[in-house]
Image: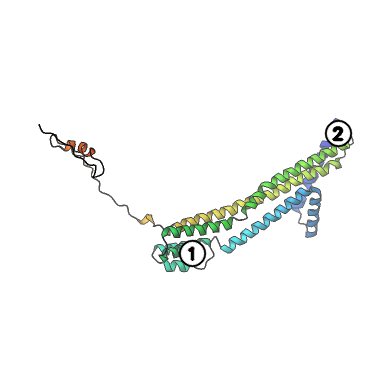
Amino acid sequence: MPEALSETAAATTAAAANISERTSTAFIEVMPLPDILERAGEMLKIGGPIVAILLLMSFVALTIVVVKLLQFGWLRINQRQPAIYALRHWREGKPEQALALIEGRRNPIAQVLSRAIRGQQSGRLAEQAVREEVLRYGNDVLFQLRRGLRPLEVIGSLAPLLGLLGTVLGMIKAFQQLEAAGNKVNPAILSGGIWEALLTTAVGLCVAIPVVALLNWLERRVDHLAHDMDNLATQIFTEDLSAVKPAHAHTDRRPPKKPVPGSGTENAATTTSMYHHTDEDRVPLKTTTG
């Protein structure tokens, strides 16, 4: 039995070394396309359905990222300078020049400012109604930009778990083959299960790491856009308080006068508190004469 365990350990070490050598060679060498397809077919054959699912998830994630990049590029969400210059013209009392800078632009910030300025210029809508319409449009734009990010989050979360599942299944397969071999342990029997176990883990991590990184980058860009939209659109309805000088109110710091005994002022507060707040209920005190 100790000899069987030692042979098993040696077989495991040899298989791990073989896998490490093949993996490093695959990264260093630049293989042509037919060899890459052949290697991918071999990985699918050895890894089983887990690797196939992970590769499909990676293809879906890559498609979503490309679509979102094209959407961000078409909307030109990085162009903030025209909206900033338009806001400056609006505060200077030049709404026509402000609209000329942002008219026809696909940038969401420019569209929000254009709607806010037109609503304020029309005079037919109350300011609250204009605010609600601008808020509705901004929320709709952000919803469209965030579409597709949820599947990326799911793929980034499930890929390592699927890789771990493949690892567990591969190790179970390896120990089943070891049990079936009995005392006649063959190192080649263990190589298939160990390769499948390590392969699924590696593929799961290779899918999850870039997906999570790209997801955070895309969400960050949407958050920056949402902040700029809210910041610039709010300034259409407000004024710049940095140029407003504070008013110095005059305060009388003289001490209050003390009531003079016998003048009747000391009983003024008491007399006032005896009246109700309405004129109908104000009943004066009756004085009796001796």
Position of residue 153 in the picture relative to residue 8 (left or right): left
Using a 10 Å C-alpha cutoff, classify the residue at mark 1 as few (fewer than 14 neighbours), some (14 to 19) or many (20 or more).
Answer: some
Which residue is label 1 attached to?
Answer: 82
Residue at horizontal 56 percent and vertical 55 percent from the top: 222
The location of residue 35, given as percent across then percent down, is 80, 57
Mark 2 neighbour density, 10 Å: few (under 14) some (14–19) many (20 or more): some
SS at mark 1?
helix
Numbered mark located on residue 285 in the image? none
**Which residue is tagged 2?**
4
Instruction: Name the kind of residue labelled 1 in the image.
Output: Pro
| Quadrant of the rendering where the N terminus is positioned | top right
Assign a secondary structure to mark 2: helix
**Residue 232: in sight, yes or no?**
no
- Residue 182 on image: x %, y %: 88, 35
- Residue that protrudes farthest toward the right in the picture: 184
Report whether residue 175 is seen. yes
| Above/below status of 8 relative to 152 | above
- Residue occupying image coordinates x 69% and y 55%: 60
Q: Where is residue 126 shown, x and y percent of the image?
A: 41, 60
